[in-house]
Amino acid sequence: MTASRPRILVVDDEPQIHRFLAPALDAAGYEAERADNAADGLRAIAKRPPDAVVLDLGLPDMDGKQALQKARAFYDGPVIILSARDREMEKIEALDLGADDYVEKPFGVGELLARLRVALRHKVQQAGGEPMVTAGDVQIDRILRLVSLRGEPVRLSPKEYELLVRLADGGGRVLTHRQLLTGIWGPAHEHDVQYLRVFIGQLRQKLEADLADPKIITTEPGVGYRFNAD
């Protein structure tokens, strides 16, 4: 008996997106499902929850962020946002509303598939937890609350450790400035982006081999940061 393929629901009103993505998802081992508007997408999610959703922000019947918010009331699977390049604030708002990641239009299928793999892997990790996280020469031992670089312990302040673990728990997803600031320092600090940059800089000083080209904690300009685990 063969296992069923992961089902990916693509919610987009552009026929060319479906013509482009359906064969690419099929070739990558996924079962592609189609919805041309938010209402059909929400019904499909409620009727038979997919393994992941690819959701366009520019839908004809409902704002994509509103559709995401409605979906999150009953769906906890990965949601990858499709967005136009000139709508950066909408991407940030969508991430804050519960999207797992985003891909900018126009996009390459390889990038979308990579984002899907990360989101699906993160879903599995959430179910079982990851006691040890590795990124290059860096190891985070969640049980002992120890961080090491090439086998040597790294001294972190409590806030530095909390920030590093929160980034690592993102499972390769981008976490917005607001998500990090409110999650660690509280709602009163949601706009203190420079404060966050200082802590990111301190972590990079202690963990990155090349500060000019960081590999472990990377910046999503104007949006937030990613932790790139192995």
Image (cartoon, rainbow, N blue to C red):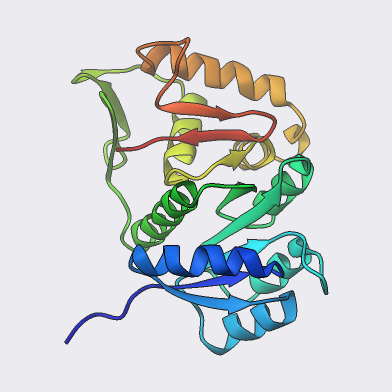
Tell me if 131 is positioned left or right of 219 in this view. Answer: left
**Residue 18 image-quadrant placement:** bottom right
On-image quarter of the C terminus: top left
> Total marks drawn?
0
State the image coordinates of residue 1 (x, y, percent, origin top left). Answer: 16, 87
Tell me if 178 is positioned left or right of 168 in this view. Answer: right
Tell me if 33 is positioned left or right of 61 in this view. Answer: left
Residue depicted at x 49% and y 70%? 22
Along the viewing direction, whichever of 79 and 73 lies nearer the viewer = 79
Along the viewing direction, whichever of 195 and 4 lies nearer the viewer = 4
State the image coordinates of residue 179 (x, y, percent, origin top left). Answer: 64, 42
Residue depicted at x 60% and y 84%? 44
Along the viewing direction, whichever of 44 and 167 lies nearer the viewer = 44
**Residue 185 image-quadrant placement:** top right
Residue depicted at x 31% and y 61%? 128
Residue 123 sits above or below residue 166 on the image: below
**Residue 92 image-quadrant placement:** top right
Tell me if 89 is positioned left or right of 186 in this view. Answer: right
State the image coordinates of residue 39 (x, y, percent, origin top left). Answer: 74, 81
State the image coordinates of residue 140 (x, y, percent, origin top left). Answer: 30, 33
Residue 51 sits above or below residue 166 on the image: below
Along the viewing direction, whichever of 183 and 227 lies nearer the viewer = 227
